[in-house]
Image (cartoon, rainbow, N blue to C red):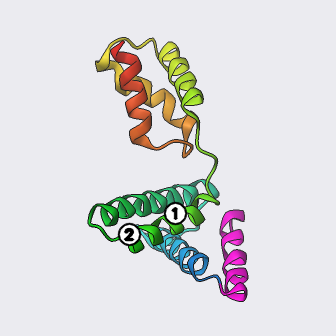
Amino acid sequence: MSALKDKLKADLSASMKARDEVRLRTIRMALAAINVEEVAGKEARELSDEEILKVLTREAKKRREASEAFANAGRAAQAQAELDEQAVLEEYLPAQLSDDELNRLVDEAIAESGAEGPKAMGQVMKVLNPKIAGRAEGGRVAQAVRARLAG
């Protein structure tokens, strides 16, 4: 079993003992999403830590989007609950890149790929994605690349 999944299961037990409802339901949801991913496809398999991070990143993004939707609908309590769950998930994710770090990596990727102009965005993203891997949201990365290529 991966180290990250072990940590999630240990934290699940700890949150049960501490009666921390938010943490408990969030970790249960995360483990359920991991289990679904493990049995998806032709045969069951065990996810690596990297694959588990992708699942947790996807779940955190769902919480952020749901929070925005609830806030726009005037449902502050539900929006806050989603934000609380997102905060718990982010404890398991790598630290997000700052804007300066992201821009530096984008510049390096542009130099490495020799890309010029907005049509070369795919080349830059292909070089950049492995370097960023879960440390910045895709939309934010695409926006930074687009801005740099535009001029």
- Quarter where residue 141 is shown: top left
Kindly state the secondary structure of the residue where label 1 is placed.
helix
Q: Is residue 63 highlighted in magenta? A: no
Marker disc for residue 86: 1
Q: Is residue 43 visible?
A: no
Q: Is residue 13 highlighted in magenta? A: yes
Compare residues 133 and 103 and report the one nearer the observer: 103
Compare residues 137 and 126 and report the one nearer the observer: 137
Labelled pair 1, 2 in contact (Cβ < 8 Å): no
Instruction: Residue at 42% x, 41% y: name it.
Output: 138
Compare residues 3 and 104 and report the one nearer the observer: 104
Give the magenta range. 1-19
Query: Mark 1 belongs to which amino acid?
Result: Gln
Callout 2 crowding tier (Cα within 10 Å): few <14, some 14–19, many ≥20: some
Against 125, is 9 above or below?
below
Looking at the rendered image, the quarter that the C terminus falls into is: top left
Compare residues 39 and 145 and report the one nearer the observer: 145
Against 110, is 7 above or below?
below
Looking at the rendered image, the quarter that the N terminus falls into is: bottom right
Marker disc for residue 94: none
Q: Which residue is mark 2?
A: 76
Instruction: Residue at 72% x, 64% y: name it.
Output: 3
Coordinates of residue 28 in the picture (x, y in percent): 55, 79
In the rendered structure, the answer to whether residue 115 lies left or right of residue 109 reads: left
Coordinates of residue 98 in the picture (x, y in percent): 58, 35
Query: Mark 2 belongs to which amino acid?
Result: Ala
